[in-house]
Structure formats: structure tokens, C-alpha cells
Amino acid sequence: MLRVDTERRFFLRFKVEGGFQSEFTPMVRRRTYQMVQETRMNSSLKRLDQEPKRLIMIGGKGGVGKSTCASAIALHFAIQGKKTLIISSDPTPSLSDIFETEIGDQETPIKGVQNLYGIEISSDVVLKKWKERFGPEIYEVVSSFASVDYDFVEYIGGAPGIEEEYMLNYILELVESGQYDLVVWDTAPAGHTLRLLHLPQIFLRHLEAATKFYMNLYSYFEKFKESVKLKKGKRTLLEIISGWENLAEKVVNFIRDTQKTDFIIVTIPEALGVRQTERIIQDFDEYQLRVNHLIINYVIQEADCEFHRLRKEMQQSYIKILKDQYSSRIRLIELPLLSHEIRGVERIGKISEILFKQE
């Protein structure tokens, strides 16, 4: 509590334009700042227990233990009594292996844990759901004024951003349905996560091109104005496109809502992990998405041989880089390298205990 109070005083009373000023002596200021950094370096996810989040997104490059962290977070909230869904959109999902329970593209109860459900959803399933929702409507509109096969729907379904956009919409529907108190999303590796941030621009550019295409066709059939209208109650293609634009805007607004959504990045203390993390956070900043926690995984805590001593020394240099860059605004959490693999509810629970330790 002393450290939290110190942090609050330091940032609320002494942050001024151009830097920090204080009536304290330089030595006291340095110690206060050091305490702030230590507070954030020794942080946990405990504060999330007090915040009514509806969606927690876990991101990071492949191979950093992202799915393990997502599983531990989901397990924690399920044990707390929240009905929780963990969903993986990773092309090579591992939730089934981690929980030692067969999980597919349907909501599946996790054995041995109340309130916890899982889904491993592939891009094929996402596109199938998109086609089921929009396909017939699109085909009916277009075929009313042009001779096209149903394959035209497949073409539109391959548009840049469609898969990611509908994935976000699918998760948004799960959240808004009220069926679950919390959805924990184990996203695909970093490149996919970054594309999610860029997709509104990509998607809306495609919609602009589709609108021009439609208007060009429409001009040729202007004399058949009534034929480009569907029977009463149906929408024109322009209205459908407008609906997609509204959907894109709704999704972006939702993931930017800090009251409902939280972003957690997982990395490792190595060059590639640090560089990828820098890129992710830079993109998040650009799109006004706030990262609150950064989990540094596979940290060697006790060096019991020369190999581990050298590895620990290397890791500490990268941890310092992350600390210097982000500890003033992001809570850094170190997760130790363990001697055993994390499989099964009991071992996942041990990770939960570390991530949600009392600060």
C-alpha cells in the first residue's frame, strides 16, 4: 500500500509539462521513482479482479507461452465464479493439449473446472459463419441485376479483412449475448494481431472499391431501377455495404472501450521477443489501444549452472530494455521458467497463482 500511495503522489502531484519537479531532494526523488518502477516490475494481474472486463485479449509472437497464459487467466476467473469462455483463433491451437480435453469449434466445457468453456476456431469456420450470415443476401441482391454464380459470394468472402472483421464480430456477439461473464481471447501470433489493428482501413478500402463496382453496374441498368431493388423488406447492396461499415465501426469502438476490454501482451526476454513487443505496442499506441500488462515469460530466476548463469545474464539485459521503455506506463510481470511443461488444470492453476499474486 505504501508503494501504491507513493506512486499516486508522485504522478498526481509532481508531473508537470516537460518532466518531473519536486520539492524533494534529488536523492529522495530518485528513490521515489525507483519505488514506482519496482511497484510496476513486481506487479500482477490482481487488479483485474476488481474491474468488470468483458473481453481480455492475449497477444504476442508465436512460441512465447501466450496460450498457456490465456488458459491460466481464464482458469482464474472461472474459479472466481465467473462463467468464462476461452477462445483460440491460433492456426495451430493448443488449448486441447494444455487442458488435456478435446476442444473443437463448438463451446466445450473444460473437464474438472466449473464455469470454464473453450473453443478452438479456425479461419474456415469463421468464413463459413460469415457466408451463412451474409451470403444469401448478397447473392440475392447482385443476381437481381447481373448474371452471376453463387461463387461470387466466395469472391467477396475473400476480401481483405473479412475473416478478421467477422472474427471480431463473432467474439463481440459472444460477449454481448450475456451467455458468458468474460471472454478470454487467445489471439493468433503477433502478425495476425497487428493485422486486426489495420483491418478497418483495409476493409473499408475494399468496401469503397465494392461500392464503385456496384455503382458502375448500376449505371448500366439504371433504366431498370426497380429491378435492382429486392422485394419489400430486403436491402440493396449499398445498404448491405453500409451495414458492414457500421459493423466495422462498432467492433473498433468495442475493442477501444477500456471499461470492457483489456489487452495483455506476452513476450520472452530475447531479442526477437523484445523487437516484436516493441512493434506491437507501437501499433497499439497508433490505434489508441492501451496495453496495461506485459508478461515476460520463461525468466530464469535461479542460475544453478554456467549455462543458466549466461542465459540469465542475457535475459536480464532484455528485461532492463523492457523495464526502461515501458515500466512507467505498463505493468510488467515476470513468469519463471519452470522445469516441467504446463499441462492439466493443476499446473495451469500454478501459473494462475503467479499471475494473480497479491501485490
Image (cartoon, rainbow, N blue to C red):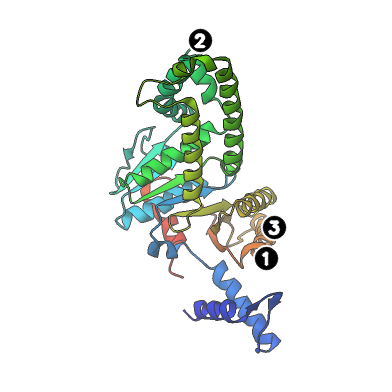
- Left or right placement of residue 313 versus residue 192 in this view: right
When asked about the image quadrant of residue 314, the answer is bottom right
Image x and y of residue 193, in percent? 57, 43
Residue beneath the point at 57% across and 35% down: 203
Instruction: Determine the CA span between mark 1 and mark 2.
Output: 61 Å
Q: Residues within 10 Å of mark 1 (few under 14, many from 20)?
A: few
- Left or right placement of residue 337 versus residue 86 in this view: right
Q: Is residue 90 visible?
A: no
Please name the residue that numbered disc 2 is placed on.
147
Instruction: Determine the CA span between mark 3 and mark 2.
Output: 64 Å
Image x and y of residue 257, in percent? 47, 55
Q: Earlier in the sequence, mark 1 or mark 2?
A: 2
Q: Which of marks 3 and 1 is nearer the N terminus?
A: 3
Residue beneath the point at 58% across and 82% down: 13
Q: Which of marks 3 and 2 is in front?
A: 2
- Dot 2 falls on a residue whose secondary structure is loop
When asked about the image quadrant of residue 190, the answer is top right
Image x and y of residue 141, in percent? 45, 20
* Residue 282 to residue 22: above or below: above
Q: What residue type is disc 2 on?
A: Ser
Please name the residue that numbered disc 1 is placed on.
324
* Residue 61 to residue 356: above or below: above
Please name the residue that numbered disc 3 is placed on.
314
When asked about the image quadrant of residue 22, the answer is bottom right
Q: How crowded is mark 3: few (under 14 residues within 10 Å), some or many (20 or more)?
A: some
* Along the viewing direction, whichever of 185 and 100 lies nearer the viewer: 185
* Along the viewing direction, whichever of 125 and 207 lies nearer the viewer: 207
